[in-house]
Image (tube, rainbow, N blue to C red):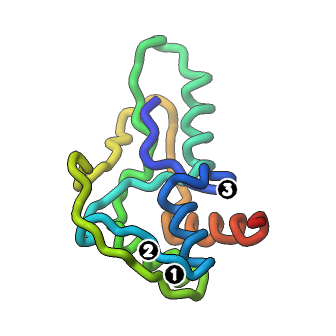
Amino acid sequence: MRFFTVYGPAQRPDLAIHKFTKRIDNGEAIQQFGDGTTRRDYTYVDDIVQGVLGALSYRRSPFEIFNLGESQTTTLSDLITAIEETLGKKAKIEYLPEQQGDMPLTCADIDKARALLGYNPRVKISEGIPKFVEWYLANKK
């Protein structure tokens, strides 16, 4: 199973969505590497679970590789905007040069997982960010 940028409730606090949400909520600056045009295939954890469950019942070959992602991309700038809008707070951004070796785009080709596992991601980033922020606000310490 190849997972593409998984996020959702109980996400590790060192990953971008969690880290950005916390820092924006606390009025702290976030670090943005590059101009914000890098794109990621953000995948909500419920969709990943659906794909894993499909793989558990797959019986054809024990050596298949499946991509599990949303198969749509979101720019870093749009991600930050979505978090800002959901929190109702503006991000303080520390602009930094691109990180060496950072991929400008990641996107899952999920055709094989759709066909063989019945994988069908349902949670768009526009729904997933508010779900994550709701969890974050209810569980922050």
Seen in the picture, residue 14 relative to 52 is either above or below; the reply is below
The span from disc 1 to disc 2 (Cα, nearest Å) is 6 Å
Residue 138 got which mark? none
The residue closer to the viewer here, 87 or 44, is 87
Q: Is mark 1 on a helix, strand or loop?
A: helix
Q: Looking at the image, which residue is at 61% across and 78% down?
A: 25
Instruction: Identify the amino acid type marked 1.
Output: Glu
Query: Mark 1 sits on what residue?
Result: 84
Residue 9 got which mark? 3
- Image-quadrant location for residue 51: top right
The span from disc 3 to disc 1 (Cα, nearest Å) is 18 Å
Residue 37 image point, x, y percent: 25, 68
Instruction: Identify the amino acid type marked 3.
Output: Pro
Q: How many labels, in total?
A: 3
First in residue order: circle 3 vs circle 1: 3
Q: What element carries label 3?
A: loop
The span from disc 3 to disc 2 (Cα, nearest Å) is 18 Å
Residue 125 image point, x, y percent: 49, 65
